[in-house]
Image (tube, coloured by chain):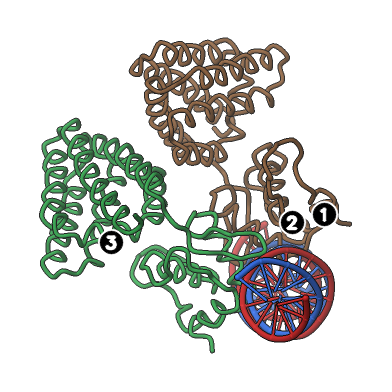
Chain colours: A green, B brown, C red, D blue
Amino acid sequence: MKPLASEAKAAPGKLRIEQAPRTLREIALERMRTAIVEFHFKPGQRLVERDVCEQLGVSRSVVREVIRHLEAEGLVHTIPHQGPIVATLDAETAAQIYELRALLESAAAQSAATQANAADIARMSLALDAISDAYARKDFHDVLSATNSFYEAMFMCAGKPVAWEMVQRLNGRISWLRSLTVSSAERGATGPLQMRQILEAIKAGDGPAAALACRAHLATAGEIAQRLINLESP
Amino acid sequence: MKPLASEAKAAPGKLRIEQAPRTLREIALERMRTAIVEFHFKPGQRLVERDVCEQLGVSRSVVREVIRHLEAEGLVHTIPHQGPIVATLDAETAAQIYELRALLESAAAQSAATQANAADIARMSLALDAISDAYARKDFHDVLSATNSFYEAMFMCAGKPVAWEMVQRLNGRISWLRSLTVSSAERGATGPLQMRQILEAIKAGDGPAAALACRAHLATAGEIAQRLINLESP
DNA sequence: TTGACTCAAATTGTATACCATATTACGGTT
DNA sequence: AACCGTAATATGGTATACAATTTGAGTCAA
């Protein structure tokens, strides 16, 4: 009946008090978000309140609040008196998102290059290894999460948590494109290589080179994305 | 009892069909948002559900959904079992936001410089006049809205609606800082001047100059903001 | 005074029932 | 096949009930 309630415990690990009185709402939010970005709910699909209630085992109140949150995040689009649908993505918007990511990430990389300490570099290096490993296993889900780890480390060492927040939100809107992009054959070849170049430039403390590598990385990613999008909706 | 319901009619003016089945929720959302950014609800202030219900004349459901939306927008911060409070802003976050604005706006300005047509420039010019006029009248509320119009025109003619959306969200989080900044004496002197420089560069089709002018504009704005923030919380 | 403990009040978190209204689907009519 | 009216469905919104939790006041003891 209430499959969510059983997970209301605390998260493990950290030293910090980390009071985690996770509310049902938060759990439901996370779960719906991943359901959307992991493509379980497909773009354009209707999200009928009562169905979602049943699937999540929570009341309408919770579902409605969660949907408002996702709406504000740009993951769902609500049509009055017709209900929420999973947001769709057109080629133009996707292009703008990749452009913004290039802008934000290259700035972060440049900044990271001048401030990264050993621990930061270790984190990024670790994430990169995880990416290569996941590619070898063809586990594209892990590729994405390791990629996130890499960039999170980069933005944090650059001291730009606000920018990282924005990038994450942008990524949410192109999540399905990303997973398609990542699993494309050409991406498997160039992707990790380009990211290594970013890390090398950061290691070397060469800000402009790091920024350039970032832009190159996102340029190719954006191109692949455009090809996929045109292929899907001609 | 229901002051909101009376405004559920359509907005006036436009030729467009403007399907305005504005739901209560949307109206309440707008109103709460402006209440926050216009400083009616002060940062750190608690938003007790039932009080807000009374003030808005709507039910708890609506208020809660609106709060979820604002939460996702970063305008309120919810502490579990304690309720939502209006988000506060520390100096570090403010600095990052101004930096992001500089990044986004300078990119847009550069792009606008290469694409602006006569109509675009007319729009921006008009907005600038409105800014100067509002400054002369010391109507700082109008200054802000005219400034928004200027930037909206700029981002639109640059073909970057997604970036504009992000800037607007960032602006929401620093709205009270902006109004303080705008009404500072020094800002009255340099602000419109710097924006004229941006427009001149766009008119001249000089992208790099436009970007530079943008960065200069935001650099001084950011400095003033930092001074104000340190002055407020020492 | 400080500290700790208890208990009541206030508020949030969640569920549920209900109704009005708008949309959609269906089914019959021409 | 196009048209129209009606029923079914879903959303938008309200009200209410209740458990869980925080907060604060007050009390008592050291």
Q: Which image quarter holds the C terminus of chain B?
A: top right
Give the alpha-carbon distance from disc 2 to disc 3, as whole Å.
38 Å
For image coordinates 50% across by 54% down, the residue present is A73
Amino acid under disc 2 = Leu
Q: Which residue is mark 3?
A: A179
Q: Is residue B16 above or below residue D4?
A: above
Q: Which residue is mark 1?
A: B5
The chain that hosts pointer 2 is: B
For image coordinates 16% across by 57% down, the residue present is A126
For image coordinates 42% across by 36% down, the residue present is B96
Give the structural element (helix, strand or loop) at label 3. helix
Q: Percent x, y for residue B131? A: 63, 17
Give the structural element (helix, strand or loop) at label 2. helix
Give the structural element (helix, strand or loop) at label 1. helix
Front residue (pair B158, B171): B158
Q: Residue furthest right?
A: B1
Q: Percent x, y for residue A52? A: 54, 76
Q: Choose top left, top right, bottom left or bottom right for residue A146.
A: bottom left
Give the alpha-carbon distance from disc 1 to disc 2, as whole Å.
7 Å
Q: Is the C-beta separation of discs 1 and 2 under 8 Å? A: yes
Q: Percent x, y for residue C23? A: 66, 66
Same chain check for tags 2 and 3: no
The tag on residue B150 is none
Disc 3 residue crowd, few under 14, some 14–19, many 20+, Cα 10 Å: some
The tag on residue B24 is 2
